[in-house]
Amino acid sequence: MPRLARKPVTWYKKSMSKIKVLDLFSGGGGSSSGARAAGAKIVGAIDAWNLATEAFKENFPETHVVTGKLEAVVLKQLRQKIGQVNLILASPECTNHTPAKGSAKRCEASRQTAFQVVRFARAFKPRWLIIENVIQMKSWKGYKKFIAGLGELGYHIREQILNAKDFGAPQTRRRLFVSCDLEQMPPEIRPRKKRKMKTVAEILDPAGTWEMKPVFIDNRAPNTIVRYLTGLNKIGPHKPFLLVYYGSDGGGGWQSLDRPLRTITTVDRFALVDQSGKEPRMRMLQVSELQRAMGFESSYKLNGASRRDRIKIVGNAVCPPMMEAVVKKLTQKRRTAKRSNRSTKSGEAIRT
């Protein structure tokens, strides 16, 4: 890892009433929701998808939101608009890293957009950076260069794999978090001890809220019937459970309601089966339920888009409770520590 190219700036040592945040690849505001819950002020956000930025504006009306590609943003003008920031959040485009894309060809140009984080960090010089992505980002051939670019700016870097279920979100969602600090080695993020896992049962809307249809109807897909019969054989009659569509599934296409939801993606993939009546009935999980599974507050609004687009916005988001925990831990007042190159079971510290 390269040595410091220059001495880090020290403007951030001045007293601050609130940590000011710029959110890159902001989507509908999952990361910003977590940062706001941690006490930060979101002053800027940028995303290329107009429906996502519309959702962001609805939930963060005081924030300067830019709709467009990061490479098209004139940094001098943005800085004049939002001022200095203490923390940059970034969730670079993940579609071309994630296994959810299957065997489809990856777009290297899309993955290269991650280097915009380095560009913005060089221009704004925030004390802290938090980069979130799917864990497969680490196997990208450009990843080491990306991390090296952050190191050359003077950042101390820690990489960790975190799971949303360990931070209060009722979902199994493993993600890479790269924490960066100009002044000292970022702390290791650990879940609170003895936290009770939230489950699928806790996110469901009350019975009767949504229409349910019989499992056995003429136009029902054969694979859906197979998933139902597999779940029925495992869980037994009369008990509700979920059918799981899409993606590699080692569970046979179903899951029980007494554990966290499997990873939410950008498409409909979960159906609730009710076996309490004379015949089994089913429905897809709704956007309100998926929002709860992501850990969004009940006040989070998602209006003005189609159901498919709302599911995409939710599936693309960062779980707010995860980001809240990372922001709190990274930005809390800590005594200056010696630089460390130690490795831990749950994270890796990198010395620049």
Image (cartoon, rainbow, N blue to C red):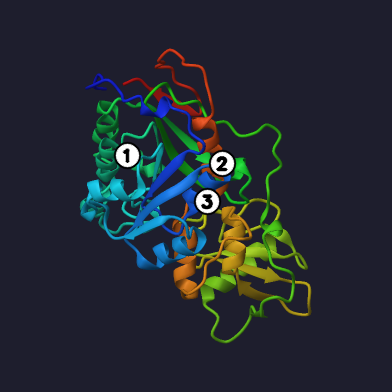
Q: Residues within 10 Å of mark 3 (few under 14, many from 20)?
A: many
Q: How many marks?
A: 3
Residue 208 lies, with reference to residue 94, above or below; the image says below
Q: Looking at the image, which residue sits at the far bottom? A: 218
Please indicate whether residue 182 sits to the left or right of residue 72 in the image: right
State the residue in front, 270 or 103.
Answer: 270
Viewport quadrant of the N terminus = top left
**Residue 163 vs residue 89, the one in the foreground:** 89
Residue drawn at x 55%, y 80% is 220
Q: Which mark is residue 212?
A: none
Relative to 11, residue 204 above or below:
below
Decide which of 183, 136 is in the foreground and name it: 183
Sequence order check: which comes first, mark 3 or mark 1? 3
Confirm whether residue 266 shows in the render. Answer: no
- Measuring 39% from the left and 56% from the top, which residue is drawn there? 64
Helix, strand or loop for disc 3:
helix
Are the two marked residues, 3 and 1, in contact with CB atoms closer than 8 angstroms? Answer: no
Give the numbered dot on residue 139: 1
- Secondary structure under tag 1 reads helix
- Of label 2 and label 3, which has the lower sequence position? 3
Pointer 2 residue: 38
Q: Residues within 10 Å of mark 2 (few under 14, many from 20)?
A: many
Q: Mark 3 or mark 1: which is in front? A: 3
Residue 105 sits above or below residue 121 on the image: below
Which amino acid, by three-letter code, is at mark 3? Ser
Quote the CA–CA distance across marks 2 and 1. Answer: 31 Å
Residue identified by numbered label 3: 33
Q: Residue 134 appears at what percent x and percent y?
A: 41, 46
Of pointers 2 and 1, the one earlier in the residue sequence: 2
Residue lying furthest top: 338
Is label 2 or label 1 in front? 2
Quadrant of the rendering where the C terminus is positioned:
top left
